Amino acid sequence: MRVSFRRLMEILRFFLLFVTCALLSYGIISLLSDRFLPGDPYREPHGNAVKVVKLINAQGGGSWDGYLSRLQLFYLTGE
């Protein structure tokens, strides 16, 4: 099986074009993700931030009523 020089150059040109397009698209995607996604999404909020969730019976661990009502609320709302 013989491969001509012209065919080998076509394969090499296709491979180089494919690698170039892949690197270019990776660069564009990473540039866009840096532009639009926040740097640290888990940082502590600043400004007038308010804690949304209030734990039920956080200090006293003897009663199951608070935990059962919280579980029922979870099943009803899905949150």
Image (cartoon, helix red, strand yellow):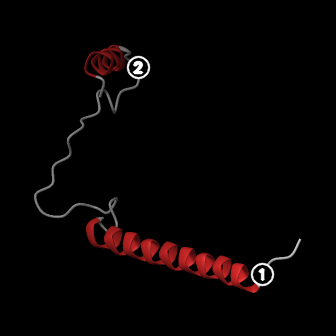
Task: Residue 43 in the image: state x and y as whole percent.
Answer: 32, 63
The kind of residue on which mark 1 rests is: Ser
Task: Identify the residue at horizontal 36%, vertical 20% (top origin).
Answer: 67
Query: Could you say which disc has been placed on residue 50 in the image?
Result: none
What is the secondary structure assignment of the residue under circle 2? loop
Task: Identify the residue at horizontal 70%, vertical 78% (top origin).
Answer: 7
Task: Residue 22 in the image: state x and y as whole percent.
Answer: 51, 72
Task: Identify the residue at horizontal 18%, vertical 64% (top origin).
Answer: 46
Query: Could you say which disc has been placed on residue 4 in the image?
Result: 1
Q: Is residue 26 above or below residue 48?
A: below
Say whether disc 1 or disc 2 marks the residue closer to the N-terminus.
1
Query: Could you say which disc has been placed on residue 62 in the image?
Result: 2
Task: Residue 38 in the image: state x and y as whole percent.
Answer: 29, 66
Q: Is residue 49 left or right of residue 27?
A: left
Q: Quadrant of the C terminus?
A: top left
Mark 2 packing: few (<14 Cα in 10 Å), some, or many (20+)?
A: few
Q: Quadrant of the N terminus?
A: bottom right
* Mark 1 vs 2: CB contact within 8 A: no
Task: Residue 19 in the image: state x and y as whole percent.
Answer: 57, 76
Tell which tag, 1 or 2, sits nearer the viewer: 1
The kind of residue on which mark 2 rests is: Gly
What is the secondary structure assignment of the residue under circle 1? loop
17 or 67: nearer the viewer:
17
Looking at the rendered structure, the number of numbered marks drawn on it comes to: 2
* Residue closest to the far right: 1
Q: Quadrant of residue 64?
A: top left
4 or 68: nearer the viewer:
4
Q: Is residue 52 above or below residue 57?
A: below
